[in-house]
Image (cartoon, helix red, strand yellow):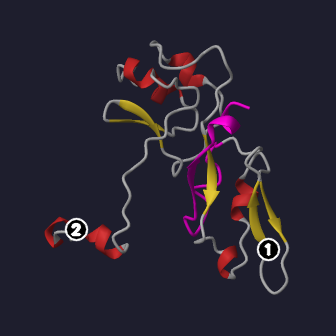
Amino acid sequence: MTNPASISRRTFLTGGNEQPVQRIVPPGVMEDGLGSCTGCGACVEACPTAIIAMVAGKPSLDFMAGECLLCGDCATACPELVFDRASTPVFSHVVAISDDCLARNGISCMTCRDACPQAAISFRPRIGGPFLPELREAACTGCGACIAPCPARAIAIARQLAEAAHA
């Protein structure tokens, strides 16, 4: 049983479902690259959308602040061997739309579709309710453009299968 003294107000008000924060690294960071990071912050200064912040001395993306353009400026600015500079920057994740989605709860909303630069989110018509979102994982770059605009906070990062990430 959980000790009531160890429950934060946020945990209590969200029903005890507070999850540990997941670090989202910039695109192209090698699997062991964060170990080489000195925390200099060059990637933070180079990011044109200002979504990179140093968390515990390592770069982390905040998609609530904006989207990643996959421009590679962070990798170019990094003086260490953190990024794989030999390949195009990609993420090892896609997004997932939860059941908290307004459209899935009978309220018409297509904000995520409108925000997605890759048109990876489309809406399927249905009888008796608003259109339902469908994500084409193959088209999703994981840029996070759909996360902040979602009024229900129903979109989050989801890990891609290893086969799909390297296809």
Q: Residues within 10 Å of mark 2 (few under 14, many from 20)?
A: few
What range of the chain is rendered magenta? 142-167
For marks 2 and 1 on the same chain, the one whose residue lies earlier in the sequence = 2
Residue 158 located left or right of residue 44: right
Q: Nearer the viewer, residue 120 or 4?
A: 4
Q: Residue at point 16% right, 69% down?
A: 3
Q: Residues within 10 Å of mark 1 (few under 14, many from 20)?
A: some
From the top left corner, tell me how far across and down residue 30 is, in percent: 52, 23
Q: Secondary structure at mark 2?
A: loop
Q: What's the residue type where badge 2 is placed?
A: Ile
From the top left corner, tell me how far across and down residue 49 is, in percent: 57, 38
Q: Nearer the viewer, residue 2 or 24?
A: 2
From the top left corner, tell me how far across and down residue 151 is, in percent: 59, 68
Quarter-wise, where is residue 148 in the image? Answer: bottom right
Q: Is residue 24 above or below residue 7?
A: above
**Mark 2 to mark 1 CA distance (whole Å):** 39 Å
The label shown at residue 131 is 1
The label shown at residue 7 is 2
Q: Decide whether the magenta segment is chiefly helix, strand or loop.
A: loop
From the top left corner, tell me how far across and down residue 18 is, in percent: 36, 63
Quarter-wise, where is residue 47 in the image? Answer: top right
Query: Is there CB contact under 8 Å for labels 2 and 1?
Result: no
Q: Residue at point 71% right, 72% down?
A: 109
Task: State the quadrant of the C terminus.
Answer: top right
